[in-house]
Amino acid sequence: MKRLFTTAFLFSFLFAFSQDYKSSSRLSFDPALEPFYHGVASGDPLPDAVIIWTRVTTAAPGNLSVQWEMATDTTFQTIIASGTETTDESRDHTVKIDVTGLSPAQYYFYRFEYDGKKSITGRTKTAPVGDNDYLRFAVVSCNNYQNGYFNAFKHLAERNDLDAILHLGDYIYEGGVTGTPGVPGRLHEPPHETITLEDYRGRYSHYRLDPHLRALHQQYPFICAWDDHETANNSWRDGAQNHTEGAEGLWADRKLFGAQANYEWLPNRIDESEPLMIYRKLTFGNLADLHMLETRLLERSEPLSGQFVPLNDPQLWDSTRTMLGTTQMQWWQQNMLNSQARWQIIGQQVMFTALNLPVIPLLVPQPSTANPDQWNGYAYERQQIYNFVKNNNIQNFVVLTGDIHSSWAADLPDTNYNATTGANSRGVEFVTTSITSSNTAFAIIPSSLYPAIEQENLHIKYYDLFNHGYLILDITKDRTQSDYYFVSTIQERDFTTYVGGSWFCNNGESFLRQASAPANSPVNSDNVPLAPMVYPTSVNEHSDIVIVSSFPNPFTDHFIVQFYSEKANKAELRLTDLAGKTILTETYPVANVGINYVKIDAQSLPPGNYILWMTSGNDSFRRNVVKVR
């Protein structure tokens, strides 16, 4: 049998990667977590149910049986639900369970077990029913791994005063390793742009190994929507700015790959057969309905080109251009009409309120709308929403937004809006800044021109363009308040936090007022312990080598194996057919402790299904790979 690759080629490939991926910056598999290296998570809480999640990383082939249990205490003395779930490679070995029969407004603790090894303990909370006085959410968005440490996630994981985390998109970024990272060596894996299903799975896997993100998922249920970077920058129904049809495959395939990986890796309550339909409503008693919208992949019309579009451009008022589409719009409107909740909270992706620019010499030749990828570029549909809110007397309309890596608080101005009294504001919007993504949206505009822009946008009451962090949404019967929390740095592990501003909307007013201080939580967090970050090391013994992913898969002439190695050692690679016949065997030294890569040249291999084995010492991992054409 002709060798498919040479030892010299293997060594040169590994050496080349080691120059770009310094071992000191690599995410490590925590030995104590085996085989649940990615931790646990929960999401989309209902009064009587919640999704719980984990991922099993193991060498075992075929279906895996994973046990789970949920209790009312951290020591699992009072188990109220348990069961067994199966998973396999078709789901990237992820496990999602909708645990039902729970009590409302109750904290629960959960864990998983596979092959005698237990996961860390997760904590979650169900939604309330009936009359309730208080809710508190953290609102986050835009966590670009390459741009810095997830310090805001660390701070949130330690707060212990939240009902849930609302993530409004850009959970991952699709780009490859380009430019200079915000932290030396903190780089995306896989190192190329994500295009295939294996690529997206690998990127989620890499993000979910971050200890701060893992800790936040452990402590709170997440409620997630995607934006564009979960597939490709400035995506829409039939394409994306960062997608080249043909060269990068079909957009129809790529967006489904991104949606499938999103479904597998996040604890969303979504129909697996309809992974693009992520819009949904969650009810929190009679205090708030949370409407999570989809504004990217289902029906969005192509965004208008350019950074600025003249205000008199007729395309802005083209009635055929849509963000939501007819079906989702009707669903949303009916939900608001039928709602019994005091507050209508809208979780969505891109800035809703108008952001207009005056003439700026050499930059903006005439009054224009900024960033037509936002609702600015879909002015007709936005006005239809304003009309609906007005004509149906929808009260307490609050929009939550991410996307633009900066913080904003604004009224939602309709015709004849009065900036002094707030008259004819249809609601309010709170925009959270990024966790780490670059604050570059307004870098091209000199700060000396900000006063002129402020005068053009009197409905915008607050903005911060240069800080990272999150917002806390504090909801009572009397008011909804947003407190903007910032971290002092994302380039260092040590950081401090501070509040940059606080704004609120009173019940029945539909416009903003400035708060004198952050909202105080009436919750006594001492009564509800955080899930313990104590690993069950007494039962878990760590494997020396773990295959994380292989890509592309299917492949044509080559594929790359991404694997984790606990120590420098010799590793054996073996490729077999499905009958177990060995196609090749190769032994080589592992270049680095941590993540490693090896490229397999398979040009002479006939199309078909194969099994890749990697062995180090007594540990052996396998991965199914497929060659096409």
Image (cartoon, grey):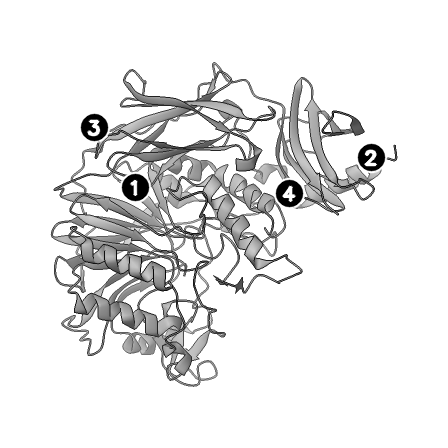
Q: Compared with residue 249, is residue 318 higher up or lower down, i.e. above or below?
A: below
Which residue in the protein does label 2 denote? 7
Distance of mark 1 from mark 2, alpha carbons?
51 Å
434 left or right of 50 in image: right
Which residue in the protein does label 3 denote? 527
594 left or right of 227 in image: right
Mark 2 neighbour class, 10 Å CA radius: few under 14, some 14 to 19, many 20 or more: few
Give the residue type at disc 2.
Thr
Q: Nearer the viewer, mark 1 or mark 3?
A: 1
The circle on residue 21 is 4
251 left or right of 606 in image: left
At mark 2, the secondary structure is helix
Q: Residue at x 44, y 24 (%)?
A: 119
Q: Earlier in the sequence, mark 1 or mark 3?
A: 1
Distance of mark 4 from mark 2, alpha carbons?
21 Å
Contact flag, marks 4 and 1 (Cβ < 8 Å): no
